[in-house]
Image (cartoon, helix red, strand yellow):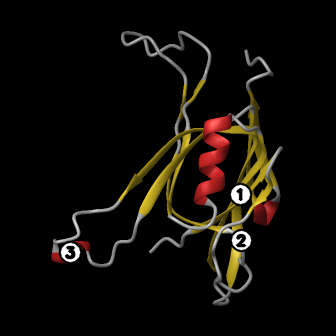
Amino acid sequence: MPMPCYMSVKGKSQGDIEGSCTIKGHEKTIFVYELDHNVGIPTDSGSGLPTGKRIHYPLVITKELDKSSPKLQQALVTGELLTEVMLEFWHISPAGKEEKYYTVKLENAIVVKSEDYFPLTFLEESKPYRHMEKISFTYGKIIWTWVPDGIEAEDSWEAPKS
């Protein structure tokens, strides 16, 4: 079973946007239940060869409504630049301890979409679900890091790739 990841956000105007997480070691972060992100290169359907520049689609996270929600909404409606959005992925090590193994860092991000939802409340199978929201970010730069070995990859809209 995958563990959730934890997100921290720094806004240019609002500063640190704290979440409501109270899990020891992750206090004040935003508890992320789901992440969806795609990067691709357009290709010719016949040859499979690239036909254009890479495309970074918005990074979308799913979270519970919490104290960060109004601030993320404020960032959306004002177009506030988020200087850093950090996602930290954790798992249980062979020694049985929680350890950070992967990070995704967005620089110069903006919130481009917010979607609040909850399932049909009268259905029995919906009882465990809470009031949730999906937040979509675009960004100027992304850095992926495999923490145990310090392996990094990055991409920036400002940096042309051949």
Label 3: how many residues lie within 10 Å, few (<14), some (14-19) or many (20+)?
few
Looking at the image, is 54 positioned above or below residue 36?
above
Q: Quadrant of residue 92?
A: bottom right
Q: Amino acid at mark 3?
A: Glu
Location of the N terminus (image quadrant)? bottom left
What residue is rendered at 32% in x and 78% in y? 128
Lower sequence index among marks 3 and 2:
2
Element on which disc 3 rests = helix
Label 1: how many residues lie within 10 Å, few (<14), some (14-19) or many (20+)?
many
Q: Amino acid at mark 2?
A: Lys
State the mark number for residue 100: 2
Looking at the image, is 161 positioned above or below residue 102?
above
Q: Position of residue 97 (x, y in %)?
A: 67, 87
In depth, the one of 33 and 118 nearer the eye is 118
Q: Amino acid at mark 1?
A: Thr
State the mark number for residue 103: 1
The answer to whether any part of residue 138 appears in the image is no
State yes or no: discs 1 and 2 in contact (Cβ < 8 Å).
Answer: yes
Residue 69 falls left or right of residue 121 = right
What residue is rendered at 67% in x and 43% in y? 75
Q: Which-is-in-front pick, marks 1 and 3?
A: 3
Disc 1 to disc 2, C-alpha distance: 8 Å
State yes or no: discs 3 and 2 in contact (Cβ < 8 Å).
Answer: no
State the mark number for residue 20: none
